[in-house]
Image (spheres, rainbow, N blue to C red):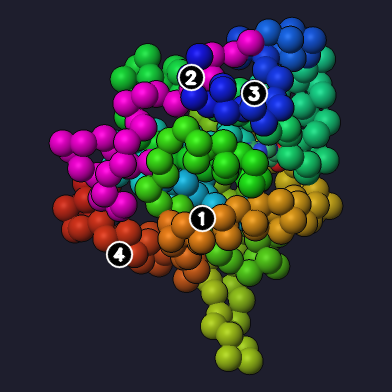
Amino acid sequence: MAALNRLMRARGFSFYSTASCRSFSSAVTSEPDLRFPSSLGHKTLPVRRDPSNRNVQWVFLGCPGVGKGTYASRLSKLLGIPHIATGDLVREELTCSGLFSQQLSEIVNQGKLVSDEIIINLLSKRLKKGEINGESGFILDGFPRTIRQAEILEGVTEIDLVINLKLREDILVEKCLGRRICSQCGGNFNIANINVKGENGNRGIYMAPLLPPAGCESKLITRADDTEEVVKERLRIYNNMSQPVEDFYRSRGKLMEFDLPGGIPESWPKLLQALNLDQEDKQSVAA
Ligand SMILES: Nc1ncnc2c1ncn2[C@@H]1O[C@H](COP(=O)(O)OP(=O)(O)O)[C@@H](O)[C@H]1O
């Protein structure tokens, strides 16, 4: 059994198997094969991919609606490494029928965090699939979200860099409420038109809507947890449970703070610059 399993057992976790669409009782009784691919377990350069070594292992932190998914997915395409969003893994589980997914949806739709145990098992299942497909490196989005998750991650693999995206809270709420997903192609869009004027020495911020193509327009859906009440609860939980994770990585010298200056056209080039990604990389993602 891999290091992550041993560490979790020492911390009092019980395990369940990672077969998809399982019942809740079977989910909590059998033992998972929980591990990070062994090839990912050694140190490399903090920021750039090194082709002679393994690919980067980065984490995106930030409040709900800040754009973790957007920028993590762009970087994943740019660097050719998987973007693993635990929120997506949870939503995949919700498409199953049965008591387990019912209980999960109650937690998610109230804006609460699912247990560390469940989330680590979902992540483990995803990593195992990636290992079989020869994946190397990753950009984690939405994990770790608690100190316990961060400690477990630290116990099994090296994280090179943690990118902490930041945006004003009133804008975060607006962005969550404007989020739309195409039920057919899965594309992510945002109908919010954010235009906050600068005042009292604070800069203004403009974020254009990210509108869907005509073919997706009639198929847009809103996440059940993107209501104002639930978004505010998610923000409250982020501040209580996830902000300490920022300090965890800050104290280890791994945290890169990134204040979003605006929408994607303004923020993306600045993010690449902050990450020291050169022109060649920028062109390859634009292609
Ligand atoms: N690391 C995690 N720990 C616990 N719960 C999680 C984690 N990642 C995702 N979830 C659950 O999935 C939901 C959706 O996650 P995500 O898509 O990352 O949302 P957000 O837009 O709030 O960042 C969360 O509100 C939570 O219930």
* Up-down relation of residue 183 to residue 159 (above or below): above
Q: Give the residues in magenta.
A: 31-57
Q: Secondary structure at mark 2?
A: loop
Gap between marks 3 and 2 measured at Cα: 11 Å
Q: Sequence order check: which comes first, mark 3 or mark 1?
A: 3
The numbered mark at residue 165 is none
Counting from the top left corner in percent of width and height, residue 287 is at 23, 45
The answer to whether residue 262 shows anywhere in this view is no
Number of numbered discs present?
Answer: 4
Q: Sequence order check: which comes first, mark 3 or mark 2?
A: 2
The numbered mark at residue 249 is 1
Gap between marks 1 and 2 measured at Cα: 24 Å
Q: Which residue is mark 3?
A: 9
Gap between marks 4 and 1 measured at Cα: 21 Å
Mark 2 burial class by Cα count in 10 Å: few <14, some 14-19, many 20+:
few
Q: Which residue is mark 4?
A: 273
**Which dot, 2 or 4, sits closer to the camera?**
2
Looking at the rendered structure, the kind of residue marked 1 is Tyr
Q: Residue at x 22, y 50 (%)?
A: 281
Name the quadrant containing residue 132.
top left
